[in-house]
Amino acid sequence: MRKEVGTRDKSVATKGYVNPQEIVSLDSSMRMDQALLVIGELSKQYAGKIIIDLEKHKNPIGVYM
């Protein structure tokens, strides 16, 4: 099964560069609901999509992103 690579992914792979203003990092101790708020705002702004957590997770994300 082959995954299609998006246009931006192709340009990043070709250039080997990511704009520092496009990098998001989250601490592993951040709660999931907080992380999803951050990622959700970016998703809405840049992709026009919203993220909904139906489970209302409150645990730490557990990984440094």
Image (cartoon, rainbow, N blue to C red):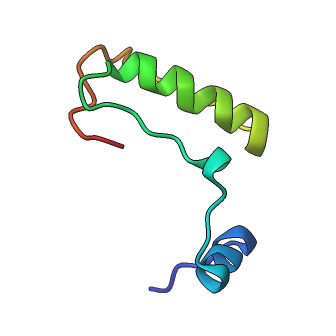
x and y percentages locating residue 24 in the rendered image: 52, 41
Residue 48 appears in the rendering: no
Q: Is residue 63 above or below residue 22?
A: above
Residue drawn 32% across the image and 21% down it: 30
- Report whether 33 appears left or right of 63: right
Q: Is residue 29 left or right of residue 18?
A: left
Q: Residue at x 55, y 25 (%)?
A: 38
Residue in front for this viewpoint, 37 or 27:
27
Is residue 25 positioned above or below 27 on the image? below
Please, which residue is most extreme toward the front here? 20
Residue 55: quarter of image:
top left
Left or right, 40 with reference to 27: right
Q: Is residue 57 visible?
A: yes
Q: Is residue 61 left or right of residue 50?
A: left
Above-or-below relation of 1 to 34: below
**Above or below: residue 53 compared with residue 11:** above
Question: Nearest the camera: 15 or 48?
Answer: 15
Image quarter for residue 64? top left
**What residue is drawn where x is 64% and y is 74%?**
12
Q: Position of residue 51 (x, y in %)?
A: 58, 30
Q: Position of residue 65 (x, y in %)?
A: 36, 43
Work out which quarter of the rendered image holds the N terminus and state it: bottom left
